[in-house]
Image: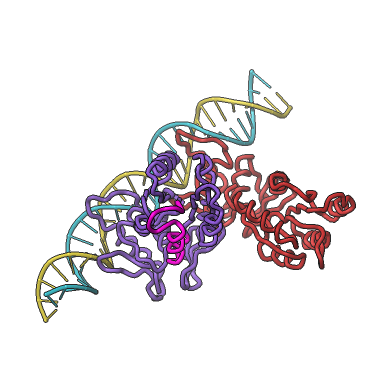
Chain colours: A red, B purple, C cyan, D yellow
DNA sequence: GTCGGCTCTAAGGTCCATCTCAGATTCGGT
DNA sequence: ACCGAATCTGAGATGGACCTTAGAGCCGAC
């Protein structure tokens, strides 16, 4: 994926925060830090990270409580919990309150990275999602769209293309990026498949003379916007 | 971005310059060389590179001083510092004066490439972030500008030109530099494309009789300033 | 085997971003 | 104040990017 993934690191130990921040930043992630549970919740609200690395044991609001609150506010953030060695009950409690995975301290950075990758892969995979943009809805499970009351059937390719747009609204997607994501091949010889499918989508989505949502950006690509 | 990434290599050792230049050019980067700190500063002003590979130890103005001056002139260039083995204090000093990362000599080209990629990902992909100058905003993702509440649609060339200005505010950009960055060709014959596009931008950005932002500097070029 | 739906190719048409050019205007130097 | 050069401005030509449509190939369902 092209956009930077945001990761929030919540731990009261500055040494851990620094190591993790540096490492993840080096890997190209956008990193936000918090030194306490309170600050973590605040930063989460502010930055909408894709994943939180969360220490269980912290003074004040601890990791379990942070997890509980994040979950209760309906967030689908991936949560990776850090637990002290042998604190088995913490792990169990962590998973029960809604953490997605845990890692035992001390850990190597590579281990952490592996967990993070696995989690992100799982989480950003669509399931049960209902994506929404303007008056357009995309039901990921049913693989169909809705607009203006009517239900729009999509073929696989149309769905994949629209999914990409819905995940990156208001963002210009270059032809290359789109081709890579939806068709997954390097087209040496040129092809106009993309244009054809954009047209298919448009004609389905604008069936009733509704305003255009997928706009052409000459010399660049396409954008989903009002 | 569409224009090629520019990298400036500053090292007094010609062997290193050659190896690095060849390798990076092969990777598709536009490479500029400098053999001393003085020349490095000059080339940086002249070519506006996205990243500088900078040797610490050089006669005359050394890498630390170059870093300091680049930073003090408000540039957000990515700086990768090359240090001799075990010169720990150089590394620390380097990071403190504003370098973004360092690499210990001797290094393999692959190592260098990996660092460069990581740095560029961090630095020049301000995805989701808005560039801002005075009351003007440039949304890099959406490829559109905003001023005085209204949204301004930009063509590709207009966008590239404005992006260049926004990345180097308050800095006089000569016609040559602009032509090189936005049009990427050596114009032997005269052309006034640049003037035409400056006009296009102005008319879009000053739509409501707002104060001018792109000013002409006679005999030199243009500046973005209030 | 036949049918229907999905995917892609191909060819022609349309449109507008880009650039050129010519004349107007402004600026700096004297 | 004047002159030449630099820059601005408007209008127009053109080429390529994008759109549109039709249909061929493919695969699975029955």
Q: Which residue is drawn at 66% across and 60% down?
A: A32
Q: Which residue is drawn at 57% across and 49% down?
A: A2
Q: What x and y, as percent, mark residue A160? A: 62, 43
Residue A213, image quadrant: bottom right
- Whether B59 is among the magenta residues is yes
Q: What x and y, as percent, mark residue A122? A: 72, 45
Q: Which of B207 and B138 is in front in this view?
A: B138
Q: Nearer the viewer, residue A184 or A9?
A: A9
Pick the quarter of the image with the C terminus of chain B.
bottom left
- Whether A220 is among the magenta residues is no
Q: Is residue A15 above or below residue B185?
A: below
Q: Which residue lies furthest to the right in this view?
A: A89
Judged left or right of residue B176, residue B164 is right
Residue B220 in view here: yes
Q: Which residue is drawn at 77% across and 60% down?
A: A74
Judged left or right of residue C19, residue B60 is right
Q: What x and y, as percent, mark residue A197? A: 54, 42
Residue A214 in view here: no
Judged left or right of residue A172, residue A72 is right
| Magenta region, residue range | B55-76
Judged left or right of residue B157, residue A17 is right
Disc count in the image? 0
Q: In this view, does D7 lie above or below A98?
A: below
Q: What x and y, as percent, mark residue A8? A: 69, 58
Residue B23, image quadrant: top left
């Amino acid at each position: 994926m092209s956009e930077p993934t945001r990761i929030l690191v919540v731990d009261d130990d500055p040494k851990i925060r620094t190591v993790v921040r540096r490492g993840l930043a080096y890997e190209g992630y956008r990193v936000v830090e918090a030194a306490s549970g309170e600050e973590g919740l605040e930063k989460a609200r502010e930055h909408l990270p894709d994943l939180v690395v969360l220490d269980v044991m912290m003074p004040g609001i601890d990791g379990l409580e942070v997890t509980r609150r994040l979950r209760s506010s309906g967030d689908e953030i991936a949560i990776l919990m850090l637990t002290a060695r042998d604190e088995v009950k913490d792990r169990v409690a962590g998973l029960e309150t809604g953490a997605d995975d845990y890692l035992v301290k001390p850990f190597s950075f590579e281990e952490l990275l592996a967990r993070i990758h696995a989690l992100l892969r799982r989480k950003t995979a669509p399931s049960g999602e209902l994506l929404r943009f303007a008056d357009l809805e995309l039901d990921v499970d049913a693989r169909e769209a809705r607009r203006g009351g009517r239900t729009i059937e999509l073929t696989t390719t149309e769905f994949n293309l629209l999914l990409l747009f819905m995940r990156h609204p208001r963002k210009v997607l270059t032809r290359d990026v789109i081709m890579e994501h939806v068709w997954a091949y390097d087209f040496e010889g040129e092809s106009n498949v993309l244009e054809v499918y954009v047209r298919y989508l448009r004609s389905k989505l604008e069936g009733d003379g509704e305003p255009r949502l997928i706009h052409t950006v000459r010399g660049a690509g396409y954008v989903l916007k009002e």
